[in-house]
């Protein structure tokens, strides 16, 4: 069997979960702001919002980016539906960029071709939802340069 991922949980993690479970609130309790602040400190970000799932996180990210009705968002077709639904939840349309046969990540050449065509048609996307497939990161440097 090929494992998709391997987690690591130690006694400190278990104790932290038990401590939260003993409080009155499992969600929106005092630990959430502490977690958000710790993430800000770790990443250097000014703000952080904890959400219940990656699906909600993608939705919030689209809202923060101003994605809305009439906008177009691109992603890849070989991902969980949340990668597209986050834009649909905001009223945007979704289109797909093909993947690279080797990495299964977004194809840089297909992205360039699609962008060139979209520019000619005057239909550039508002956002690109990049998906790092199976633990292999996309070529973010190339994507940023594009």
Image (tube, helix red, strand yellow):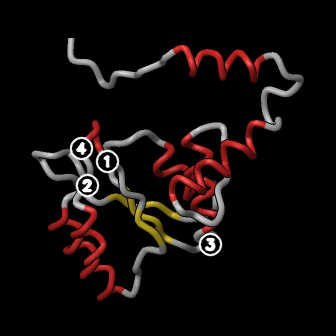
Calculate the distance from the C-alpha at mark 1 to the C-alpha at mark 2: 5 Å
Calculate the distance from the C-alpha at mark 4 to the C-alpha at mark 2: 7 Å
Residue at the spot of label 3? 66
Task: List the single residue furthest toward the right.
Answer: 24
- Assess whether mark 2 and mark 1 are in contact (beta carbons under 8 angstroms): yes
Which is nearer the eye, 44 or 50?
Answer: 44
Residue at the spot of label 1? 132
Within 10 Å of the Cα at label 1, are there few (<14), some (14-19), or many (20+) other Cα atoms? some
Q: Mark 1 or mark 2: which comes first in sequence?
A: 1
- Could you say whether the residue bearing mark 4 is in a helix, strand or loop? loop
- Assess whether mark 2 and mark 4 are in contact (beta carbons under 8 angstroms): yes
- Assess whether mark 4 and mark 1 are in contact (beta carbons under 8 angstroms): yes
Q: Residue at x 54, y 42 (%)?
A: 54
Residue at the spot of label 2? 138
Q: Depth-wise, is mark 3 or mark 2 nearer the camera?
A: 2
What x and y, as percent, mark residue 101? 12, 47
Q: Residue at x 66, y 42 (%)?
A: 35
Q: Mark 3 or mark 4: which comes first in sequence?
A: 3
Calculate the distance from the C-alpha at mark 1 to the C-alpha at mark 4: 6 Å
Q: Mark 3 or mark 2: which comes first in sequence?
A: 3
Q: Establish if 45 lies above or below 16.
A: below
- Could you say whether the residue bearing mark 2 is in a helix, strand or loop? loop
């Amino acid at each position: 069997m090929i494992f998709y991922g391997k987690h690591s949980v130690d006694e400190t993690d278990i104790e932290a979960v038990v401590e939260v479970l003993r409080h009155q609130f499992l969600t929106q309790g005092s630990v959430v702001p502490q977690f958000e602040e710790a993430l800000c400190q770790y990443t250097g970000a000014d703000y952080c919002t904890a959400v219940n799932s990656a699906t909600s996180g993608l939705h919030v990210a689209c809202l923060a980016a101003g994605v809305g009705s009439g906008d177009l968002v691109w992603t890849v077709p070989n991902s969980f539906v949340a990668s597209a639904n986050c834009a649909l939840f905001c009223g945007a349309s979704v289109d797909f960029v093909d993947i690279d046969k080797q990495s299964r990540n977004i194809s840089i050449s297909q992205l360039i071709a699609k962008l060139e065509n979209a520019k000619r048609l005057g239909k550039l996307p508002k956002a690109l939802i990049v998906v790092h497939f199976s633990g292999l990161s996309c070529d973010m440097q190339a994507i940023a340069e594009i």
